[in-house]
Image (cartoon, helix red, strand yellow):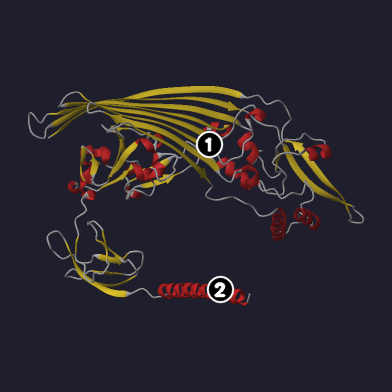
Amino acid sequence: MDSKVFFIQKQKETLGNILIRILCFLFLISGSAGAFALQPDIVKEVRGVVLDVNNEPLIGVSVMLKGTTIGTITDFDGNYTIKVKGTKPVLSFSYIGYQTQEILVGSKSRIDVVLTEELTALDEVVVVAYGSQSKVTVTGSISSIKTNDLKQTPAPNLVSALTGKLPGLTTIQSSGMPGEENFQMYLRGVSTTNTQNPLILIDGVPRDNIMSIDPNEVESISVLKDASATAVFGVRGANGVILVTTKQGSSEKPSLSISAEFGMQMPTREIHQVDSWDHAILRNQALKNDGLAPQYSDRQIQLYRDGTSPVYPNTDWWDETMKSYAPQNRYNVNLSGGTDKVKYFVNMGMLTQRSLFKTESEKKLGYDPEFKLDRYNIRTNLDIKINNWIKAKLNLATYIDKQNKPGVFIQPELRGSTDLIYASFYQHNNTVPGPLTTEEMAKEYGIQAGVPIISPDVDNGNTPYTTINGRGFLNMDKSNLNSSLALDFDLGWLTKGLSSKLQIAFDTYGYSQRDGNTDINSYRFNISEDYDAVTGEFLRDNVSFTEQSPFQYRNMSLSKSSGYLYKMNLQWIINC
């Protein structure tokens, strides 16, 4: 019995010792690992020389420790010295016109590098007046941009996408209305002859519908600025030349691209007036300066500040009339491909723009006064190889714009201008309720609900609401067809380098406009106070809603107009 008890106690001591030893072993491992992790990065010096392919030293090569701000440059003999640290340091060698190299330092203390030239930029093809050539051979002042750079900006049109991307090109936008941005382009600033736009050639044909082109169908854009680059155009190139080249197919496998872009447009500035009680205080001060009696009593000023009465409001006409943003969407599908004989590119796009102005629904008004634009783009480009020395090119493109805006723009002097709308913001102070009479007002004062309210100080009867919603509508459909057929003749079998091109272009433009002109019933608002003539105590508010003109059914005057024109262009070019 005693021996058994002794044996069990000895076994317990053995197990305890084993657990203690394991815990100590783990503690030692973690401690050593922590000590290893806390060791600082080893710093060492690396030297070397940087040469080109001809073993000539390169001066001023940037040598950087990748992922840090540590760096140096090579001296006159191409030598450099840099201190590196880290577990796996990498040195980056970069120089303008040469390919960048990255080298792992490892255990090396000397690294010599040979940089090779970057030929991509010099081999890039640039479109010029009479065709295309390598950038290294171009001597005129030419700037160009490719389609990938254009599509980085979710702009509604091509000119907007060019803004700020081409040196020497100045663009000025005079309107933000959908479909009527009215861009002006200058290549020589204020010295541009007669402040005229530059000559625009789309696929070699003079055209002025650059704002209708979908950026997805553009291959490149070149800007010719100086006399040597534009000389071939004569006097027509006096203000510079913009060359737009659309995409062509390739002999590769068919490629399908689908894209959708969603954006927002916001006003560059907002027109917010002072609060109604501040307006009343300032108005009284102005009258006092002129030696006149105040218009607003202390009681009225306090009512404006309290905001408890519908006839003592603090109306923000901007918020009542304007949205915070307007949506803008673009959808695009294009297909390209072909064989050695036939190449094709097909593009279909749709752009939708809506307005920053708040408008009533067509169901309520019987017509649609909203600013909006729906644009449809379709393009087909075909390249056909007829034989070894004749090639044909057929380009077809159509652009359809469906534009709508308020009837106030029917007036010729207001076409393309929002001046009258913005003027109404300044004419209506925020002591006037609005924009419409409410059900509460209708019950209290025996008037109709949902009728626009006009300030007593406005003579023309326009409010921001009536200017946008109460003047009818203007609807315009525009269509533009661009077509061109070109034959390229390679006459090298006659004389080396000789070629000729024959091109005929036929463009059509048509529009159809429908105008709906009407007016709207409105109330002119006024308010004053009655006081007891003896005691001077306040009696009541005199609130009046006076019909601007006798209320009646407002007829709408409808009119329609349309127009059509076409252009033909014939070119024969000989290159030798």
Q: Residue at x 8, y 29 (%)?
A: 493
User: As drawn, is 276 to the left or to the right of 328?
Assistant: right
- The alpha-carbon separation of the residues under discs 1 and 2 comes to 105 Å
For the residue pair 252 and 149, the one nearer the viewer reads as 252
Question: Residue 504's quadrant in the figure?
Answer: top left
> What residue is shown at x 26% (from left), y 65% (from top)?
62
Residue 420 visible in the picture = yes
Which quadrant is the C terminus positioned in?
top left
- Tell me which amino acid carries mark 2: Gln
Q: Percent position (x, y) of residue 96? A: 24, 59
Residue 462 appearing in the image = no
Q: Is residue 497 rendered to the left or right of residue 366?
A: left
Rendered residue at 41%/32% (across/down): 333
**Residue beneath disc 1:** 414
Q: Are marks 1 and 2 in contact (CB under 8 Å)?
A: no
Residue 161 to residue 88: above or below: above
Report the front residue among 196 and 58: 58
Q: Amino acid at mark 1?
A: Leu
- Please name which of the two marks, 1 or 2, marks the residue nearer to the observer: 2
- N-term-proximal mark, 1 vs 2: 2
Crowding at dot 2, Cα within 10 Å, few <14 / some 14-19 / many 20+, comes out as few
Q: Pointer 1: residues within 10 angstroms few (<14), some, or many (20+)?
A: few
**In the rendered picture of this protein, how many numbered marks are placed on residues?**
2
In the structure shown, which secondary structural element does the residue marked by tag 2 occupy?
Answer: helix
**Regarding mark 1 in the picture, which secondary structure is present there?**
helix
> Quick one: 29 or 92, which is closer to the camera?
29
Q: Position of residue 272 (x, y in %)?
A: 62, 51
- Residue 508 lies, in percent from the top left, at 37, 24
* Residue 460 rendering spot, x and y as whole percentages: 65, 38
Q: Quadrant of the N terminus?
A: bottom right
Q: Is residue 470 above or below residue 240?
A: above
* Residue indicated by mark 2: 11
